Amino acid sequence: MRLSQAFVPTLRDDPADAEAVSHRLLLRGGFVRQLGAGIYSILPLGQRVLDKITRIIREEMARIGAQEFHLPALHPAELWKESGRWDAIGDEMFRLTDRKQADYCLGMTHEEVFTAIARDELRSYRQLPQIWYQIQAKFRDEPRPKGGVLRGRQFIMKDSYSFDVDFAGLDRAFDLHAEAYKRIFERCGVEAVPVEASSGAMGGSESVEFMAHTAAGEDWVVSCSGCGYAANLEKATSRTTTEPDTPDPAPTEKFPTPGVRTIEDLVEFEGGAPAARQIKTLVYQLEDGLALFLLRGDDALNEVKLMEAAGATQVRPAHPEEIRAALGALPGSLGAVGVRHLPIYADLRLRGASGMTTGANEDGFHLRHVDVARDIADVRWHDLREVRSGESCSRCEKPLELEKAIELGHIFKLGLRYSEKLGARVLGPDGKQSPIVMGSYGIGVDRLMAAVVEAHHDAQGIVWPLAVAPYQVVVAPPRMNDSAQADATERLERELAAAGIETLIDDRNERAGVKFKDADLIGIPFRIVPGPRALGNGCVELFERESGETSQIALDRVVDTLRQRLAV
Ligand code: ATP
Ligand code: MG
C-alpha cells in the first residue's frame, strides 16, 4: 500500500480530553475516530490490527474445538424476560420498541440467544459437548464510557459458550478456555494475569478474569508475590482474623454525641472510641427494600461483595429521607441494635466483637458496650470488607499488593442457571432429561487492541508487536523525486509484495523527518530507508522500531533478511 493513497489521518498533537495512552495514540496514529460518547469508528489501520487479533482468536478457538456463529444484535425482549435479566439489568441495557410496540434490546451479551438455540436444537447427550462462539458487536450503556475503545458503549466481543452433560464436562471446557486465553494474550503480546473474580449475583460457581496491569485500568487486582495468589479486589480476602473479644458484661449504654457525624468524629470525640472499636452501619436500597450492612469502623465496604452477599443485582446507597423513615435517625447516628424489621448483613470481622460503639438510631446519640452476638438480632455473616494494600496474604502471610488493571477476558462457570430458566435439556445416558451445564467466556477484542498499545509504546508512539502490527514493514525513501531512491523503492515494493510481506510505501512528498515520525507514531516494526549514502554502497538502512537499532543491509538481501526477522 502506498501511503500517498492510503487513509491514515495522523495527528501532530495530542487530542484534548484523551487521557489513556492507548486512546491518545490510537487517535493520533489514525486507527480510530470518535463518533459519539463511547462510540468509535475503526479506520483502515485499526481494522488491520483487529483482523490480526481476531485471526489469532479464531485459530486458538479452533484449537479447542469451538465453532463460529454470527448471532443477531437485536434481541426480542421475551428471551430476556425468560432468563429474568430483562428486569434484573438496569440502565446498562439499550432497549427499543419496533413499529408494533414490541420490546427489543441490543445484545450486551449472548447467553440467552445461544441457550435458546441449544434448547431448540439439542436433544441428546450424544450431541454434547459443544463450544460455540462469535465475534460481534455488543452494546452496553456504560455509565462512564472512557479511555476510547477501552470502555465503549458499542464494542467488539469474542464470546463463547460451552454446553456439557455434566459438571466434569464444564470443568474441562473451562480449563480449555483458560489455556486458549493464555495463548491468545501471549500471542498478542500482552501479559494478562488470571485472577479470581466475583461470580456476581447472577449465579455461577467459579470465575476467572484475565487482567492486564495498566494505569488506565478501572479494576484493582490484589496479588501476593509470595505464593502467586491473585484476585480482583471485589473478591480478594486477606488474613484479618481477629480474636473474639472477651464478653463485656456491661449492658449497652446510650450517650450523647452532639455534632458527631463520621467514624473519625467519634474517634476525636471525648468518650468516643477508636475506629476499630466502632461498628459502621451502612444502609442500602436493594431490589426488595432496605438492608443494613455492618463493618468495623476502620474497614471499607465493597459493593460487589455486598451484592453477592445479598443476591442483589441493582443496589444503591439509601437516601437520607429513606433512612430516617426506616430507622428514625440520619446517617451519623445509625446502628443495628434493636433493629428487627430490616435484614442485617455483617462483615465476618465483627464476629465475636463486644465492647463496641455504634449509633443509637437517635440523632446525636450513640451506644457503647455493644456485644454483637448479644445485642444484634439475626445477623447474616458475609465477607464485605475491602482488602487493603500491605495486609497479609491469607495463604502465605506475605504482604499483599494492590495494582490497577484492565479486564481483557472473563471465563465463567454458569452451571444450570440459563438452561433451567430457558428449559435447555438433553436426554442423558440414563434416559432421563437433565439441564445442560453451561459456561460462558468473553474477550473484549477492541479493548485488547488498546491494551496492546498500553503495553507497547514509547514517547514517539506505538510499538506494535509483530503479530498484531497493521503492516510489518514501511519503506521510507527520504526523496521520492530522486531517481535512485525511487528505483530502489519500486524494486523493494515489488519484491516485498512477491514475498508476501505486508508493506507500506511512504511515497509522500514529505521531508524524511515527517515520514520517520509518522512511521514511529503508527508503530510499524521495521523501517527501510533507501537513502543516498546507503544506496551508494548498494545498501539500505534497516531500522527496528522496538530496539531502535539501525543496520545496513545490501539491497538484494532485504527480502531474505526480513523473511528471517519476521519468522520469529
Ligand atoms: P468490566 O468490568 O470492564 O465492565 P465486564 O465484567 O462488564 O467488564 P464481561 O461482561 O465479562 O465484562 O465481558 C467480557 C469482556 O468484554 C470483558 O472481559 C472485556 O474485555 C470486554 N468488555 C466489557 N465491557 C466492555 C466495554 N464497555 N468496552 C470494551 N470492552 C468491554
Ligand atoms: Mg461491565
Image (tube, rainbow, N blue to C red):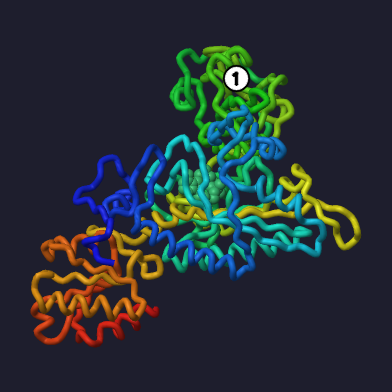
In the displayed structure, would residue 464 be above or below residue 112?
Answer: below
**In the image as oriented, which residue stretches furthest toward the right?**
431
Q: In which quadrant is the N terminus drawn?
A: bottom left
| Residue occupying the point 16% across, 84% down | 539
One can see residue 345 in this view = yes
| Foreground of the two, 512 or 404 | 512
Q: Measuring from the top left, give residue 162's x and y in whole percent.
A: 68, 58
**In the image as oriented, which residue stretches furthest toward the front?**
99
Residue identifier under label 1: 367
SS for callout 1? strand
Q: How many marks?
A: 1
Q: Amino acid at mark 1?
A: Leu
Q: In which quadrant is the C terminus drawn?
A: bottom left
In which image quadrant can residue 168 be found? bottom right
| Residue occupying the point 41% across, 41% down | 38
Q: Measuring from the top left, give residue 40's x and y in whole percent.
A: 39, 45
